[in-house]
């Protein structure tokens, strides 16, 4: 089995787990998790080394994170059973308690992740410990002024071990990004902030993502890196794809069966 | 207090290699020695307080103690959510340093004042606010703050210790002076206006004077304060902070829970009642926090 096939198999398993979690909890944010799941699988099962760090700035995609944490053995699979239940560490957003392995910072309010990641990444300047910090942002994250404060800082300080991946699905809380608060020319913005920028034309495809990671990680010009991954909200489930409402809605029984069926077939 | 603060941090910087100092582009004529002492561990992050605080939390998560410096309003209010979530909820070892608490920046105006800072920050999980009352108080408080693991806020101002006043051993609530008829509790340098009031045609032993240097107050009030309130039955609270969420409210609750009833007079920052600006002394006068107004209320209370 090729590396890509292995990633596809892992992703398929993760989607099934993810859908089950959302269904049992009758919870929303499914579209956001499916949008970035390929990125997270790519990171946790291919790119990240043991010493590397990860920040999910778009905390509403917590289930994608919980799923890959469990699948990669960072947390026990059994921990997932508590998702959304009273007394859980696995709420709708990653916890701030520092009690969940693999979650350095709880998130959920947009615009924090890039600064946190920059701070963690900067620490190696004092400690001498080498590692990369990967930070996944949403379109909405890039509405926040604090994200651009962090971008200015990271570039100014030449924090080259910082790798930002933007889950650019073009949809945000109450509309399309282009209609709410246009981000284009998006790549040029990050370039002008002095980031090394690579665009992944299909952020829900491992070939496209791995190619983008290869390009930025082989770049040794001292700049922080940014991958703008063109993704689809609700990727892999036809009736959710590119639909804003799947930021919020839980699935009916029929929808769940259809989603499980489609996502299983897609990557078989 | 900036001089005393920077001298303290300069010493700590040499002894503690895991301390990092971040400034939001402020510190002219105050932090040059800290910058020199810390070298690359001193970072001017620019005028971007939200990034500054989350950045500090990120560094702290890797085992560093991180100080974030600005003037009090900029240090607290712009990055309030970053302090709440990234620092306080995660219990990170980040120290927010705010210069010019209260009306400290006087004629600079309302944008530069911080009269709601303690209310905001003391309501956050794990946060401890430290409020020196005079310049001589700073070094010990900085050391106490730096030794405590977790989120802290240092609210600095300016205050010269009254001649002859010996600083008692440090604690969050300290008795500065003994008296008979009323109990006075104050927070920050405005307590010095009480000492000035005492010099105005008044019995020297009229009041027990306590200074509060940590907020929120510990749930168990010190015995000497409780005893004083029970004995005098009259409590005057002075603070250069709004009434909501400040010392007066905090202390009142704790006294009520102890059934320590007393007459309470609360003098606090009233904002900008006439919409006009002036020096710190001007704003204190508008709030009846100046020595003359405090003298008047002490006399009234003691004669009741």
Image: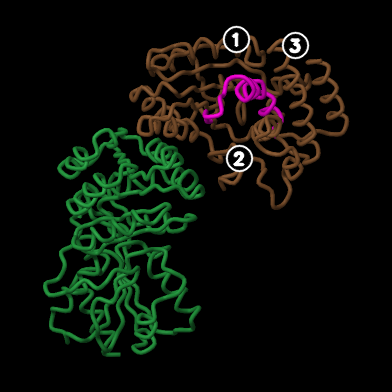
Chain colours: A brown, B green
Q: Left or right of A64: which side holds B102?
A: left
Coordinates of residue B87 in the picture (x, y in percent): 45, 46
Q: Secondary structure at mark 2?
A: loop
Residue B239 is covered by the magenta coloring: no
Q: Which residue is mark 2?
A: A101
Q: Left or right of B153: which side holds A1?
A: right
Coordinates of residue A247 in the picture (x, y in percent): 68, 31
Q: Which residue is mark 1?
A: A201
Q: Left or right of A260: which side holds A150?
A: left
Q: Residue at x 60, y 27 (%)?
A: A172
Which of the two discs, 1 and 3, labels the residue nearer the N terminus?
Answer: 3
Can you tell which mark lies on residue A161?
Answer: none
Do the residues at pointers 1 and 3 share their chain?
yes
| Magenta segment boundaries in residue numbering | A29-53
Do the residues at pointers 1 and 2 share their chain?
yes
**Residue A215, above or below B94:** above
Q: Left or right of A129: which side holds A85?
A: right
């Amino acid at each position: 089995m090729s590396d890509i096939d292995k990633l596809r198999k892992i992703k398929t398993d993760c989607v099934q787990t993810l859908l089950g979690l959302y269904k049992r909890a009758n919870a929303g944010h499914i579209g956001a998790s499916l949008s970035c799941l390929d990125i997270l699988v790519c990171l946790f099962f291919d790119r990240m080394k043991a010493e590397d760090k990860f920040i999910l700035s778009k905390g509403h995609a917590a289930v994608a994170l919980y799923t890959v944490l469990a699948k990669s053995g960072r947390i026990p699979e059994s921990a997932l059973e508590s998702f959304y239940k009273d007394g859980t560490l696995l709420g709708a957003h990653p916890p701030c308690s520092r009690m969940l392995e693999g979650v350095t910072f709880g998130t959920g309010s947009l615009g924090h992740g890039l600064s946190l990641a920059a701070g963690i990444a900067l620490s190696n300047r004092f400690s001498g410990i080498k590692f990369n910090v990967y930070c996944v942002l949403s379109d909405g994250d890039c509405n926040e002024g604090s994200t651009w404060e962090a971008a200015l800082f990271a570039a100014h300080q030449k924090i080259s071990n910082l790798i930002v991946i933007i889950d650019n699905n073009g949809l945000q809380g109450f509309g399309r990004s282009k209609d709410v608060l246009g981000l284009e020319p998006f790549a040029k913005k990050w370039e002008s902030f002095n980031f090394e920028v690579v665009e992944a034309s299909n952020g829900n495809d491992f070939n496209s993502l791995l190619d983008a990671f290869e390009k930025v990680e082989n770049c040794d010009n001292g700049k922080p890196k940014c991958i703008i991954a063109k993704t689809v909200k609700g990727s892999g489930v036809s009736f959710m794809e590119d639909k804003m409402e799947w930021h919020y809605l839980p699935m009916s029984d029929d929808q769940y069966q259809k989603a499980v069926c489609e996502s299983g077939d897609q990557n078989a | 207090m900036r001089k005393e603060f920077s001298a303290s941090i300069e010493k700590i910087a040499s002894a503690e290699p895991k301390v990092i100092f971040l400034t939001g582009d402020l510190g002219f004529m105050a932090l040059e020695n800290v910058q020199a002492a810390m070298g690359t561990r001193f970072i001017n992050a620019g005028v971007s307080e939200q990034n500054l605080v989350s950045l500090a939390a990120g560094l702290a998560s890797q085992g560093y103690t991180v100080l974030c410096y600005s003037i009090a309003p900029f240090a607290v209010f712009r990055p309030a959510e970053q302090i709440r979530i990234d620092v306080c909820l995660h219990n990170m070892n980040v120290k927010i340093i705010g210069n010019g608490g209260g009306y400290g920046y006087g004629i600079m105006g309302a944008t530069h004042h911080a009269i709601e800072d303690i209310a905001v920050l003391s309501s956050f999980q794990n946060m401890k606010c430290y409020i020196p009352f005079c310049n001589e108080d700073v070094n010990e408080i900085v050391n106490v703050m730096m030794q405590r693991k977790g989120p802290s806020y240092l609210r600095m101002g300016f205050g010269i210790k009254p001649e002859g006043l010996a600083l008692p051993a440090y604690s969050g609530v300290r008795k500065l002076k003994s008296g008979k008829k009323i109990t006075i509790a104050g927070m920050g340098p405005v307590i010095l206006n009480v000492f000035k009031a005492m010099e105005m045609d008044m019995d020297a032993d009229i009041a027990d004077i306590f200074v509060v240097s940590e907020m929120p107050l510990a749930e168990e009030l010190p015995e000497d304060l409780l005893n004083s309130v029970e004995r005098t039955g009259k409590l005057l609270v002075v603070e250069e902070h709004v009434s909501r969420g400040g010392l007066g409210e905090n202390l009142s609750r704790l006294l009520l829970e102890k059934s320590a009833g007393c007459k309470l007079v609360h003098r606090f920052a009233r904002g900008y009642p006439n919409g006009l600006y002036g020096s710190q002394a001007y704003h204190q006068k508008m709030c009846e926090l100046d020595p003359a107004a405090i003298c008047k209320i002490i006399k009234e209370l003691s004669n009741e």
